[in-house]
Image (cartoon, helix red, strand yellow):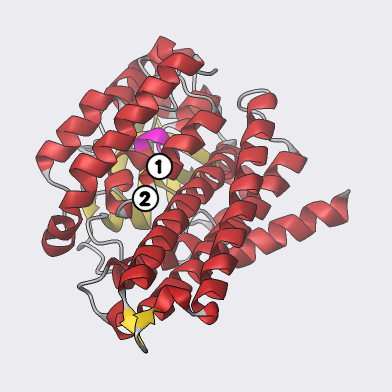
Amino acid sequence: MALDNETFSILRSTVQRFIEQRLKPAEDILEETDDVPAEIVAEMKEIGLFGISIPEEYGGSGLSMAQECDIAYDMGHTAFAFRSVFGTNVGIGSQGILMDGTEEQKQAWLPRIASGEIVISFALTEPGAGSDAGSLQTRATLQDGHYILNGTKRFITNASRANAFTLMARTGGPGADGITAFIVPADAPGISLGKPDKKMGQRGTKTCDVVLEDVKVDAANVIGGTPGKGFRTAMKVLDRGRLHISALACGMADRLIHDAVDYAKQRKQFGQPIAQFQLIQAMLADSQTELYAGLSMMRDCARMYDANPPGQRNAELSMAASCVKLFCTEMVGRVADRAVQIHGGSGYISEYKAERFYRDVRLLRLYEGTSQIQQLIIAKHLLQR
């Protein structure tokens, strides 16, 4: 699955112009209102951003993983909330259906996801099950051809915007084999939302609890039609999502470096631009070197992903995705820290983007699996070789 080079080049140029002309100028509005303007969301739908990862046969653009990472890299050059609006449709919300869903489920859901007609979220994390996803407690009990769901999901991205959830619940015994993946309509009776989370950064992104009280879901909404495979579906989805997040991290690192260079050229101390000072140059050089390493890892892993049979989990690829996610998200944290340092006192003032993005990038080391979980995954694969 890939778009031909000419068509992809046109799409990418369109996205880059959209970022420069529409998104960057709206960053301050986003920060002030804690929301993405409706007219910008509508333009995202027109461009086709909600469906870039979905095959053309289901109404999407059908980008390869490498092409998707290029778009995510570009989107990383502006506030993360803009990408978050369509991020769950492109990634963790839709990919479980695409990878493991029945043909009927794909036909019913993917075209509407790709167009942005519906927003779909991914509901895995719970108050007592974050990194240890296999211990989730949300229960789905089979009764007369449908399931009754009870439980609470936490930190669910786009929950307040969602029309549906790809949701993991326990249908069997303890452990990963007892987990099933469901498509749950957001307007199903018994679903309620918690208050919006107030976060350190990433204003404009929407997360909150999703509470399920005797929610009735038809058995036909089990992804793939077979209970007990939800954990495997979730892990495949997260492998892919980690690569997308890595590309996003690289994009933001590039933005931070450019902003730091511009500031260093115009800010004067001791009668000359601080860009002339070698210690400033060293910080810029370290950031660029780490970005180059991250981009190289991300692009190599994306090629590996495209060479792998779709929907299959490969141990080496899974380890590589964790390596990339670990490095790139930690890398952008260091780049952001240096950008603040180069800005000096101005870097601690909200008037400058360095302060804002320093807060925003911190989340990248937590979601789609913390850095420590990535370390455990990498070590596990090494020990099993």
Q: Residue furthest front?
A: 271
Q: Secondary structure at mark 2?
A: loop
* Res 370 seen here: no
| Three-letter amino acid code of the residue under disc 2 | His
Packing grade of label 1 (10 A; few <14, some 14-19, many >=20) is many
Tell me what residue is drawn at x 42 percent, y 71 percent.
339
Tell me what residue is drawn at x 30 percent, y 25 percent.
48
- Front one among 384 and 164: 384
| Three-letter amino acid code of the residue under disc 1 | Asp
Magenta span covers which residues? 89-93
* Res 119 seen here: yes
Above/below status of 109 relative to 262: above
Q: Secondary structure at mark 1?
A: helix
- What numbered label is drawn on residue 77? 2
Tell me what residue is drawn at x 20 percent, y 55 percent.
27
- Front one among 57 and 102: 57
Residue 323, given in percent of the width and then of the height, sits at 67, 54
Residue 327, given in percent of the width and then of the height, sits at 62, 59
Q: State the residue position of label 1.
A: 74
Give the total number of marks visible in the rendering.
2
